[in-house]
Amino acid sequence: MDELNELTYKIRGAIFEVHNELGSGLFENVYEAALLLELKQKGLFVKNQVELLVVYKGMQLGLGFRLDILVNDEIIIEIKSVEKLHDVHKKQLLTYLKLSKYKLGILVNFNVAKLVDKESLIRIIN
């Protein structure tokens, strides 16, 4: 788990850097693009808009979701730019974790004056 904690620390640093540089009030895709650059500069392997198909009883339904960012094929980052995070946002990320079998996700709301743990920056474990 130490490796995941170290990876989470790097991700959080990148998130804070993007927020400090861009501030709040932009669209999610702007934060996604900036965060991708920041994570790559930290030497992390990142993919964005990763397709996540829904499988029901062993059959692909032809439906799916898109993960905003996947870091080192281990951690999902779900980006929001909303007035306030709600339970539905947390449930969305938890659903992604369950469907993908990844253990850890980070939910971040960039549309805030200051990033605060458990309010605008939330770590979710499956």
Image (cartoon, grey):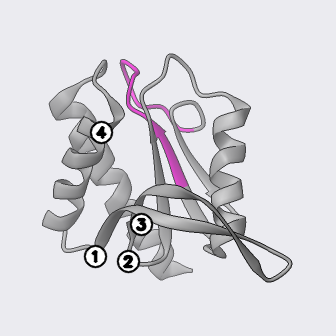
Q: Residues within 10 Å of mark 4 (few under 14, many from 20)?
A: few
Secondary structure found at label 2: loop
Q: Secondary structure at mark 4?
A: helix
Q: Secondary structure at mark 1?
A: loop
Q: Verify CB contact (< 8 Å) between mark 2 and mark 1.
A: yes
Q: Is residue 92 above or below residue 74?
A: above
Alpha-carbon span between mark 3 and mark 4: 15 Å
User: What whole-number distance in Å separates the C-alpha atoms at marks 2 and 4?
Assistant: 20 Å
Marking on residue 70: 3
In the image shown, does 16 or 48 lie closer to the viewer? 48
Identify the residue shown where x is 50% and y is 79%. 2
| Residue behind mark 2 | 72
| Callout 3 secondary element | strand
CB of mark 1 within 8 Å of CB of mark 4?
A: no
Residue 108 point in image, percent of width and height: 46, 40
Judge the density around disc 1: few (<14), some (14-19), many (≥20) Cα neighbours within 10 Å: some
Q: Which residue position is annotated with label 1?
A: 45
Query: Which residues fall within the magenta stretch?
Result: 106-117
The residue that label 4 is drawn on is 29
Q: Is residue 73 above or below residue 79?
A: below
Q: Quadrant of residue 11?
A: bottom left
Mark closest to the chain's N terminus, 1 or 4: 4
Disc 3 residue type (three-letter): Leu
